[in-house]
Amino acid sequence: ETTTETTTETTNSPSSSSSNNHDSKSTEQRNFYDIAVNTHTDKVTAKSRLPECLKHDNICTRPSCVRENCRPWGHFYHTMYQQRLGPWSTDDTEPFQFLEVGFYNGNGFEAYNEFLPKAEVHSMEISCIEAGPREEGKWPWGNFAANNKKWYDRLLKEERLHCGDANNVTWLDEIWRTKMNRPDAPPLKIVVDDGSHLASHMIQS
């Protein structure tokens, strides 16, 4: 099964060049791979699983796949994130908003939050809506987000975890107008869609 994440930058990234009055530490990019390994997000697990997978084909998710990098479970997204988001990870970056679609268990959120210290990170998640039949607009498969004891209650209180269906444009507009596009809020710069991975949903969101 192939999954897809879409990263959208709403403006140009910060300049990679530093001015004379900035020290090298303030312009140094954080390392997404190292941070993501520590938060246990699947965005980078394929890299760490690949060596053992190549030694023991039977433990691979896709045994004997012609392309070796496709054999282990997980992804190699660290290269893309470092390239696209690295310029936003420095200490001298101006404050900005970052939106993740698809909080799930919060491991990816935690990686973004640490990687982007100047970001006001928001996330959208469908599993924390009211429990009940899907045909009634509810969620019958459990609240995945609530399993993250570190962030769940805090983010709800801070109105940075938004429970709803990101395929619903009316709901998206409501969250944008009432929770994110505030007079005191920094500008929204980056959106990462890691929700259902369905193209029709990603077009909507």
Image (cartoon, helix red, strand yellow):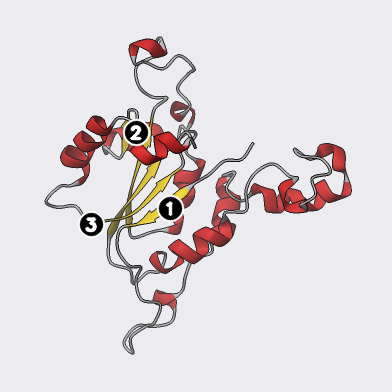
Residue depicted at 49% across the width and 37% down the height: 197
Instruction: Kindly identify the amino acid type of the residue bearing the numbered disc 3.
Output: Pro
Quarter of the figure with the N terminus: top right
Measure the alpha-carbon separation of dots 2 and 3.
20 Å
Residue 75 in the image: x percent, y percent? 62, 48
Q: Nearer the viewer, mark 2 or mark 3?
A: 2
Task: Tell me which numbered mark, 1 or 3, is placed earlier along the sequence.
Answer: 1
Of residues 116 and 193, which is closer to you in this image?
Answer: 193
Dot 3 falls on a residue whose secondary structure is loop
Q: Which quadrant: the C terminus?
A: top left
Do we see residue 37 in this rendering? yes
Residue type highlighted by circle 2 = Ala
Total numbered badges shown on the rendered structure = 3
Name the residue that disc number 1 marks: 7
Q: Which mark is residue 166?
A: 2
Q: Residues within 10 Å of mark 1 (few under 14, many from 20)?
A: some
Which residue position holds label 3?
A: 187
| Residue type marked 1 | Thr
Where is residue 138, by image quadrant? top left
Residue 17 sits in quarter: bottom left
Q: CA distance from mark 1 to mark 3?
A: 16 Å
Between the C-alphas of marks 1 and 2, the distance is 15 Å
